[in-house]
Image: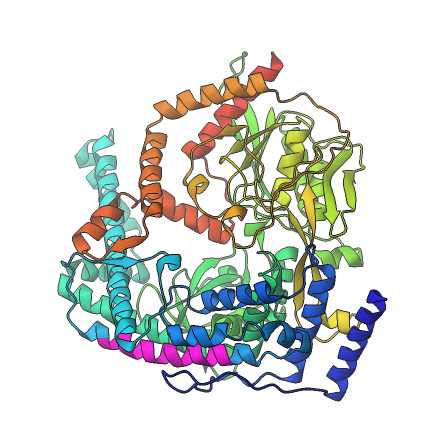
């Protein structure tokens, strides 16, 4: 009966989209702080209302909790929405929030009926407050700022309250502006330290040279005569010299101008929020009230998700980032269209985009990044023209690029072989390292039966190459791997075991289904080490948990993985309405409908997978695990499956390996430095406020100035598949050698 009612709802919504059925709703008084203004977004339409109704129905039927949209969900929705728009409580007044919260009793009914006017009222209020706050911040930038005063700014959102008066709001903004200026000073300090380190390194290199200074100087002179510096290099050098010659007053003035640009750019971008964007923010505020991983994807977000899964798209092969109103080139895909053309460089600013050979150049300064990306992307073989401000200086130029098919190789599996240590015969161990940033699969290609992109296929090829080169052990690096395809997690685990349960899945009705590897073949039967960190989640935890339960290898890295043990399915809203291949694009609901369990019955949810041997890292101490997220589902257990024990890990061996690792780490200068940085990081993390005294501010943060942290941030953001042999990787290789020796004995 319930299923029939659900199907009737889908049918009714389909008719509503066709014949244009709609309803209206009115509510909410006006805040005492001023009228609500009209945003550039339109009023909610029939399409958005019907999407809301269908998302609500799907959520009720498919979410694992089977809970209704009740008063608690309504409260969470309002809290999530306010946090998404105003995380530091800078914009809304306390009176605004009280008006919003008074509507929690109406929200459940509004969701059921598809009324989303509430989201528009909240967002238009937000824009009105932002416009006023931006004016105030620009005024504050013109006033003298005293960095010698001992005062602090509260950074813990839970301790902050929404301002009640205009004076209170202005004081909050004054401290924020001061804090932003201090952060810019920190950037200058980082740049200066980097330059100083480079100069020291160059000086040390000259002093360490075995050649006489006279000979070296003569060779340098000859090299300079043989190869002239390029115009770009000369320009960059002149720019650097000009920067170093600037006085503190000039730098302060530039920082103020940069902040003013940043504030106004943010204001413009928020006014560019579309109906689809707002619907995504609002519905996700509601869906994530059920658990952190249930969300609504707008059509554009869904398109980006599908691109990420199949690891290819048509475009120019450049990663773009919005910065102070400009779109900046942050990365060029090796072998991509832009890389082959050669004119576009890292840190170039794109200020205009034209289509075809002679299409008009459209100004894209202050345009929303998603809209810029849509203009730059296009069908393979078509031409796009970019108006570019070169990072090296000089006049604007037009770069013409022919779009091409781009494989996103930064996100695919990558392997390399390292020589490490010595065997008994004196030859080095060969250790094959595979870096896997995600569990990807081209779902459309798989459905079509074509030669599709797949994690398991790529790793199989890497393992075949390892075996041809006679590696002694394999290291599978899952650090920063946030998961992906469940099917790929199962089939990839199957490369290392004969057959058996890889993961168990329980649905909302308590039914448990084991998912098995049924292929008796093993791609790699030798020693296996799996590396994890706190950013290893979902599919990564399935593989790591199975390897640990089977005693197939050892898990090393951070203390534990992320702890995401829930299963999401992607419901294409358009296809739910009209089940045709070319259905109308209405976005998708990513909904948690099941929960993962390891072969021996423990859930990976909340707790994650604990490493057998912990290697110190800052990521272990970051509040980024499942347990740190709002409304996370709890840990539990189910009965164990009968599985094989490969005997390639035992408690005594792990204890010995861990003790050896701890000794090496204690004697390592690099790990000692890391330990000090971890202490500083943990101390800073516990603080609920930040000093706004310049001298204290810079002194407190100077201990955190290190290229390693910057590399970590870049790696997490880009999910790069680069394999670097640093001191951390050396310890991984050392543990692997100890592991091989222990089990040979």
Q: Is residue 660 visible?
A: yes
Tell me the quarter of the picture where residue 283 sits.
bottom right
290 with respect to 716 (left or right): right
Whether residue 91 appears in magenta in the rendering, the answer is no
Whether residue 130 appears in magenta in the rendering, the answer is yes
Determine the residue positioned at 59% across, 78% down. 116
Q: Is residue 164 above or below residue 699?
A: below
Determine the residue positioned at 35% across, 32% down. 670
Report the magenta stretch's main SS: helix
Percent coordinates x, y for residue 448 in the rendering: 79, 59
Numbered range of the magenta stretch: 121-139
The colour scheme of the drawn protein is rainbow
User: Along the line of sight, which residue is nearer the eye, 645 or 185?
Assistant: 645
Quarter of the picture holding the N terminus: bottom right
Percent coordinates x, y for residue 682 in the rendering: 35, 42
User: Along the line of sight, which residue is nearer the eye, 594 or 498?
Assistant: 594
Q: Is residue 404 visible?
A: no
User: Along the line of sight, which residue is nearer the eye, 51 or 725?
Assistant: 51
Tell me the quarter of the picture where residue 5 sits.
bottom right
Percent coordinates x, y for residue 267 in the rendering: 39, 76
Quarter of the picture holding the C terminus: top right
Number of disc labels: 0
Determine the residue positioned at 32% across, 61% down. 232
Percent coordinates x, y for residue 439 in the rendering: 64, 48
Tell me the quarter of the picture where residue 74 sits.
bottom right
Q: Is residue 501 above or below residue 605?
A: above
């Amino acid at each position: 009966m319930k299923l029939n009612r659900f199907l009737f709802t889908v049918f009714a919504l389909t008719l509503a989209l066709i014949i244009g059925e709609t309803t209206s709703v009115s509510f909410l008084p006006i805040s005492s702080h001023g009228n609500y203004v009209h945003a550039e977004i339109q009023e909610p339409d029939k399409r958005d209302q019907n999407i809301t109704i269908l998302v609500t129905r799907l959520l009720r039927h498919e979410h694992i909790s089977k809970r209704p949209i009740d008063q608690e969900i309504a409260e969470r929705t309002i809290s999530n929405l306010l946090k998404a728009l105003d995380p530091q409580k800078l914009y809304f007044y306390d009176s605004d929030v009280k008006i919003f919260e008074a509507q929690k009793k109406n929200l459940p009914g509004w969701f059921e009926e598809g009324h989303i006017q509430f989201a528009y009222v909240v967002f238009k209020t937000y824009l009105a407050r932002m416009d006023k706050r931006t004016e105030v911040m620009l005024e504050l930038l013109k006033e003298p700022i005293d960095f010698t005063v001992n005062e602090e700014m509260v950074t813990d959102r839970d301790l902050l309250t929404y301002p009640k008066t205009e004076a209170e709001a202005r004081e909050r903004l004054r401290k924020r502006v001061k804090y932003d200026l201090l952060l810019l000073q920190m950037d200058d300090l980082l740049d200066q330290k980097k330059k100083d380190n480079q100069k020291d390194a160059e000086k040390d290199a000259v002093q360490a040279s075995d050649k006489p200074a006279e000979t070296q100087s003569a060779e340098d002179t000859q090299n300079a005569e043989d190869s002239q510096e390029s115009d770009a290099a000369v320009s960059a050098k002149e720019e650097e010299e000009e920067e170093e010659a600037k006085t503190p007053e000039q730098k302060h003035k530039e920082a103020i101008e940069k902040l003013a640009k940043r504030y106004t750019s943010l204001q413009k971008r928020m006014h560019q929020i579309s109906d689809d964007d707002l619907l995504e923010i609002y519905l996700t505020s509601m869906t994530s009230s059920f658990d952190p991983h249930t969300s609504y994807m707008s059509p554009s977000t869904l398109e980006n998700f599908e691109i990420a899964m199949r690891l290819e798209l048509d475009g120019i092969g450049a990663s773009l980032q919005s910065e102070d109103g400009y779109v900046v080139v942050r990365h060029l895909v090796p072998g991509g269209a832009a890389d082959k053309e050669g004119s576009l460089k890292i840190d170039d600013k794109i200020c205009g985009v034209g289509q075809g050979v002679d299409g008009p150049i459209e100004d894209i300064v202050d345009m929303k990044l998603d809209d810029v990306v849509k203009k730059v992307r296009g069908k393979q073989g078509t031409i796009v023209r970019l108006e570019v401000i070169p990072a090296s200086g000089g006049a604007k130029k037009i770069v013409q690029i022919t779009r091409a098919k781009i494989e996103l190789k930064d996100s695919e599996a990558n392997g390399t072989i390292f020589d490490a240590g010595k065997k008994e015969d004196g030859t080095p161990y060969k250790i094959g390292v595979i870096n896997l940033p995600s569990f990807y699969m081209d779902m459309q290609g798989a459905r079509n039966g074509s030669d599709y992109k797949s994690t398991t296929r790529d790793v199989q090829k890497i393992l075949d190459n390892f075996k041809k080169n006679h590696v002694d052990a394999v290291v599978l690096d899952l650090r920063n791997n946030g998961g992906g395809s469940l099917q790929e997690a199962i089939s990839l685990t199957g490369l290392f075991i004969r057959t058996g349960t890889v993961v168990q899945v329980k649905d909302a009705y308590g039914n448990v289904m084991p998912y098995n590897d049924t292929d008796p073949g093993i791609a790699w039967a030798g020693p296996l080490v799996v590396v994890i960190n706190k950013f290893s989640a979902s599919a990564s935890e399935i593989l790591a948990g199975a390897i640990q339960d089977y005693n197939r290898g050892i898990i090393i890295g951070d203390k534990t993985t992320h702890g995401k043990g829930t299963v999401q399915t992607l419901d294409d809203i358009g296809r739910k309405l009209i089940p045709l291949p070319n259905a109308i694009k209405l976005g998708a609901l990513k909904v948690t409908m099941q929960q993962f369990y390891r072969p021996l019955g423990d859930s990976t949810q909340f707790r994650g997978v604990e490493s057998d041997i912990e290697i110190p890292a800052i990521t272990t101490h970051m509040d980024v695990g499942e347990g740190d997220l709002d409304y996370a589902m709890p840990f539990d257990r189910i009965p164990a499956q009968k599985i094989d024990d490969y005997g390639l890990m035992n408690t005594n061996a792990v204890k010995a390996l861990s003790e050896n690792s701890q000794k090496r780490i204690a004697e390592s200068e690099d790990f000692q430095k890391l330990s000090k940085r971890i202490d500083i990081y943990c101390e800073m993390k516990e603080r609920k406020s930040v000093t706004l005294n310049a001298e204290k501010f810079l002194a407190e943060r100077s201990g955190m100035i290190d290229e390693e942290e910057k590399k970590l941030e870049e790696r997490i953001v880009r999910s790069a598949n680069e394999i670097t042999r640093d001191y951390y990787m050396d310890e991984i290789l050392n543990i692997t050698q100890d592991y091989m020796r222990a089990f040979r004995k």
